Image (spheres, grey):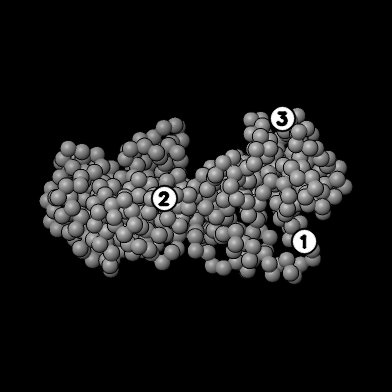
């Protein structure tokens, strides 16, 4: 797993190194790593040009020292000094010794237009708010050209801890971050600004606290996906129950049930008024049009997608939550739960809630203890943690970068997905995947995080040729799971004799 660390944690970890190393050594480590990544991105140094956007302080120093390395390899380097009297003196001297030159912001237009690479050293992880107008104008001009846009540690204008963007920000195609990945690079608007993230090791690992926010890799997910063994049967592989859809709107039931099937539990049972549609679409499912108690033995429930919000639906939700089984609550069931949050508080079995932003806000607006506040806000990780702690449930907050939080405060930020997933029915598919994983006894938060990862991978596979619909996800789930497992197998040592 990849641990995500806040700016304060990174600064605290840097302190003992700064005290123990010669002056400037830690900056040179970071700048060298930055320069190496830039050289790799450029492909060949000679004949290439790089422009450094240099602010005051250490972030600008990192850019200047990296620029010196590039100039020493034959790159034409020009530094635009946004605050000439406060530019890092050591970095500026190194750049000039290597043959780099400097220009004032008013003279930067022509070099920006011709640049192969633009390096963002305007502000670092301590930056607050959007870019000021002079810097914003330069960034806008740079972004309009063909240059690779590379951010130093974090794109300027992005909050390193939350990913919030309050105004203009540097739109990086690549971000080279030092010591640890910051949450703001992978969540919120910051994720879009960061582009591809490259982590440079500068020796902080032993000084960083254990992370409380994580990203799963394909290897992590593959290790948590059950693989049938010779002695397994349909009951030992997990049995999941689905309550979704209605006679009028069977689609949610069909999608959710299909996703559960394709995620490979041993058995799927369906209970609800979309029984005819589910039976026709998935003959592999055991179907009843009665209540959940009539479905037979299951090891986890999914309840909510498309089932309505009337009294019958409320009764079904209460029945499922009264069991001692893991339950995933989605869609219409979330609307009901927001009005009666005590239905979930105090449950001994895992409960997973899967709101999008508007559903999240209902937990405040409906008077349910105010956990949803006035909405998600800029800090998506903190918001998910707040609701999880209030309700004693795992919260999977859906979005471009889905966030999962457990009641103890540990969080996961999903690294997979595609904007093409923003279409009707994809959330029903996610619920089916997560429910199937809950039925395998995977802890609630891990099941949610693994499901989000697999769902995102399926979206990437399904959208390879363009737009997707939710049914495409269901069809591509086996391939997506196979790719996740295959990536892990490719890295395992050969065990053949």
Residue 249, horizontal then vertical, whole percent: 20, 38
Is residue 374 at all visible to an observer of this figure? yes
Give the left or right position of residue 223, taking residue 163 as reference: left
Q: Earlier in the sequence, mark 1 or mark 3?
A: 1
Gap between marks 1 and 2 measured at Cα: 41 Å
Mark 3 falls on what kind of element? helix
Crowding at mark 1 (Cα within 10 Å: few <14, some 14-19, many 20+): some
At a point 78% along the width and 49% down the height, the residue shown is 87
Residue 275, horizontal then vertical, whole percent: 16, 44
**Residue behind mark 2:** 376
Give the left or right position of residue 119, taking residue 376 as reference: right
Q: Earlier in the sequence, mark 1 or mark 2?
A: 1
Give the left or right position of residue 145, taking residue 489 as reference: right
Choose mark 1 or mark 2, whichever is in front: 2
**Residue behind mark 3:** 113
Mark 2 falls on what kind of element? loop
At a point 40% along the width and 40% down the height, the residue shown is 421
What mark, if any, has residue 25 been given in the picture? 1
Closer-to-camera residue (282/294): 294
Is residue 111 at all visible to an observer of this figure? no
Choose mark 2 or mark 3, whichever is in front: 2
Mark 1 falls on what kind of element? helix
- Is residue 133 placed above or below 309 in the rendered structure? above
């Amino acid at each position: 797993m990849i641990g995500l660390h806040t700016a304060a944690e990174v600064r605290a970890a840097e302190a003992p190194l700064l005290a123990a190393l010669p002056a400037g050594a830690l900056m040179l480590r970071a700048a060298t790593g930055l320069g190496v990544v830039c050289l790799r991105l450029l492909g060949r140094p000679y004949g290439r040009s790089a422009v450094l956007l240099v602010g005051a302080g250490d972030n600008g120093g990192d850019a200047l020292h990296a620029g010196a390395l590039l100039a020493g390899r034959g790159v034409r380097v020009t530094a635009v000094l946004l605050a000439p009297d406060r530019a890092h003196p050591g970095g500026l001297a190194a750049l000039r010794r290597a043959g780099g030159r400097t220009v004032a912001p008013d003279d930067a237009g022509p070099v920006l237009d011709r640049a192969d690479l633009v390096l963002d050293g305007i502000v670092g992880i301590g930056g607050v708010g959007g870019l000021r107008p002079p810097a914003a104008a330069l960034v806008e001009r740079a972004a309009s050209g063909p240059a690779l846009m590379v951010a130093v540690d974090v794109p300027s204008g992005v909050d390193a801890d939350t990913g919030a963007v309050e105004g203009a920000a540097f739109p990086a195609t690549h971000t080279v971050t030092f010591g640890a990945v910051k949450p703001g690079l992978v969540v919120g608007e910051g994720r879009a600004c960061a582009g591809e993230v490259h982590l440079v090791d500068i020796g902080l690992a032993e000084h960083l606290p254990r992370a409380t926010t994580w990203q799963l890799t394909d290897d992590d997910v593959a290790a948590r996906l059950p693989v049938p063994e010779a002695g397994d049967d349909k009951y030992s592989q997990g049995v999941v129950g689905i309550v979704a859809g209605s006679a009028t709107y069977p689609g949610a039931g069909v999608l959710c049930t299909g996703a559960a099937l394709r995620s490979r539990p041993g058995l799927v049972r369906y209970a609800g008024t979309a029984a005819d549609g589910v039976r026709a679409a998935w003959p592999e499912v055991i179907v009843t049009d009665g209540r959940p108690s009539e479905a037979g033995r299951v090891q986890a429930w999914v309840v909510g997608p498309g089932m309505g919000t009337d009294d019958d639906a409320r009764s079904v939700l209460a029945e499922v939550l009264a069991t001692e089984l893991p339950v995933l609550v989605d869609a219409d069931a979330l609307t009901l739960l927001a009005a009666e949050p005590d239905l979930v508080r105090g449950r001994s079995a895992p409960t997973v809630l899967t709101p999008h932003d508007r559903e999240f806000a209902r937990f405040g607006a409906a008077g349910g203890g105010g956990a949803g506040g006035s909405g998600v806000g800029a800090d998506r990780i903190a918001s998910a943690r707040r609701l999880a702690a209030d309700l004693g449930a795992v919260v999977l907050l859906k979005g471009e970068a889905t966030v999962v939080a457990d009641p103890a405060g540990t969080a996961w930020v999903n690294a997979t997905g595609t904007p093409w997933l923003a279409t009707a029915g994809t959330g029903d598919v996610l619920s089916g995947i997560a429910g199937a994983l809950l039925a395998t006894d995977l802890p609630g938060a891990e099941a949610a995080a693994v499901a989000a990862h697999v769902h995102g991978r399926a979206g990437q596979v399904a959208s390879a040729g363009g737009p997707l619909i939710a049914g495409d996800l269901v069809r591509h789930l086996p391939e997506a799971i196979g790719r996740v497992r295959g990536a892990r197998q490719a890295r395992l040592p050969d065990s053949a004799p």
